[in-house]
């Protein structure tokens, strides 16, 4: 079998583990050949590729990013896109293409499947927001990076008696914020799932200071929003692909906190450092398992399927079902988050017993 493979969307720790797993399974176990297309679907349409084998993939497991490069270009953004993809299949004698990417990339793979192309999907996003898979590789690495940063920021917040607002990734969901906020011992964590009340945030911070807790860590996902009617934030710009350019909520929040409380506040936006560097062991393992499973799905002709982690096992799910919406933070985690934030008089935490 001849299989193409590509990585689309944002870079992510663990991508090289997927590529290595797919190549190893193809060459050693299933007597198949893998061709890597550079810069996602742009490489397919422009015939920019390289043959991949076990020797080429030696040493890439601990490396961040992707050896194939990535882009957000896709065949449905140009009139001749599908024709060029078909030519690539014919030119290289491809039996399948494995597309690795996030929710947008999985949408492209699904549309290609609907147009009759033999394709398999591998979910990738540090945001961990793709449905029907319990975890995506890269997420655990991002959480560890954020947690390490929060651990370090505790000491400087304590030394200067400051509020430190830590902005982390999370456009529409708060998985990274919740996990790193709880693991790092943040006082307050704000996510897109639950719009925040800035007055309440400030009241909780002031309450901490009154009790002699002069250092406060606030974690905020980049897509977190205030409750309507509380205060306004500028509308984000949009990039050439139609995606909102997020970032900056941390600075806005710190400015509001200082203005409303008089407590010195600073911001640390972790930004793309969350994407970079060597993947943690979990992400290397999950990426490897996904790569092998994707090749096996191709060998079985399971077109239009996406490999997914479910109850510790790698399963196949229809891509069409996986892209039907985003996977939000579990309500139990949101409830857990409220248990660890500073309390206000009259607070009743979710799940607590209330006497009649």
Image (spheres, grey):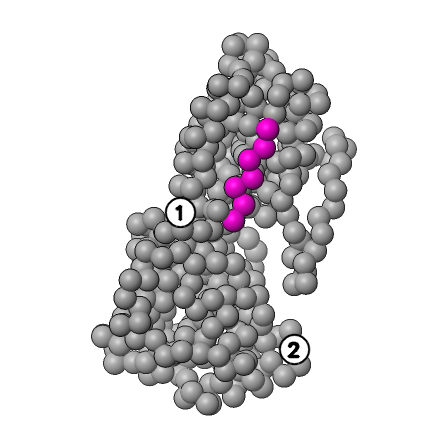
Q: Determine whether, in the image, residue 4 is placed left or right of residue 26.
A: right
Which of these two is toward me, 355 or 153? 153
Element marked by disc 2: loop
Q: Determine whether, in the image, residue 90 is placed left or right of residue 52.
A: right
Residue at mark 1 = 141
Mark 2–mark 1 CB contact (< 8 Å):
no
Residue depicted at 36% across the width and 57% down the height: 63
Distance between mark 2 and mark 1 Cα atoms:
35 Å
**96 is higher (above) or lower (below) than 269:** below
- Where is residue 6? Give x, y as percent: 45, 71
**130 is higher (above) or lower (below) than 113:** above
Which of these two is toward me, 59 or 76? 59
Picture quarter containing residue 313?
bottom left
Residue depicted at 64% across the width and 73% down the height: 77
Question: Is residue 95 in view?
Answer: yes
Q: Which residues are magenta?
A: 266-272
**69 is higher (above) or lower (below) than 200:** below
Indicate which disc, 2 or 1, sits on the residue closer to the N terminus. Answer: 2
Element marked by disc 1: helix
- Where is residue 323? Give x, y as percent: 54, 61
Residue depicted at 40% across the width and 78% down the height: 50
**The stretch drawn in magenta includes residue 269:** yes
Residue at mark 2 = 78
Q: Quadrant of the C terminus?
A: top right
- Where is residue 265? Give x, y as percent: 61, 25
Question: Is residue 322 in view?
Answer: no
């Amino acid at each position: 079998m001849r299989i193409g493979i590509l990585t689309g969307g944002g870079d992510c720790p663990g991508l090289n583990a997927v590529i290595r797993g797919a190549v190893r399974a193809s060459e050693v176990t299933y007597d198949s050949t893998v061709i890597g297309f550079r810069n996602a679907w742009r490489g397919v349409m422009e015939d920019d590729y390289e043959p991949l084998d076990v020797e080429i993939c030696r040493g890439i497991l601990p490396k961040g990013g992707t050896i194939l490069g990535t882009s957000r270009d896709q065949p449905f953004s140009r009139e001749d896109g599908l024709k060029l993809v078909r030519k690539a299949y014919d030119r290289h004698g491809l039996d399948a293409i494995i597309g690795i990417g996030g929710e947008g990339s999985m949408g492209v793979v699904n549309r290609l499947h609907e147009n009759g192309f033999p394709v398999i999907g591998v979910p990738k996003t540090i945001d961990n927001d793709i449905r029907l898979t319990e975890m995506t590789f890269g997420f655990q690495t991002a959480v560890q990076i954020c947690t390490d940063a929060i651990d370090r920021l505790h000491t400087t917040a304590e030394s200067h008696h400051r509020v430190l607002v830590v902005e982390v990734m999370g456009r529409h969901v708060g998985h990274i914020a919740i996990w790193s906020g709880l693991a790092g011992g943040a006082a307050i964590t704000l996510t897109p799932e639950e719009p925040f009340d800035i007055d309440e945030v400030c009241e909780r911070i002031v309450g901490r200071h009154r009790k002699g807790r002069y250092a406060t860590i606030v974690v905020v996902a980049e897509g977190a929003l205030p409750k309507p009617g509380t205060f306004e934030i500028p509308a984000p710009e949009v990039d050439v692909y139609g995606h909102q350019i997020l970032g900056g909520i941390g600075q806005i929040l710190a400015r509001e906190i200082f203005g409303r409380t008089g407590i010195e506040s600073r911001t640390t936006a972790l930004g793309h450092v969350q994407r970079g560097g060597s993947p943690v062991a979990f992400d290397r393992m999950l990426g490897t398992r996904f790569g092998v499973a994707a090749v096996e799905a191709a060998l079985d002709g399971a077109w239009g399927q996406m490999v997914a982690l479910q109850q510790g096992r790698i399963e196949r799910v229809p891509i069409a079902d996986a892209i039907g919406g985003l996977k939000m933070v579990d309500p139990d985690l949101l409830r857990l988050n409220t248990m660890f934030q500073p309390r206000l008089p009259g607070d009743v935490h979710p799940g607590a017993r209330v006497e009649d």
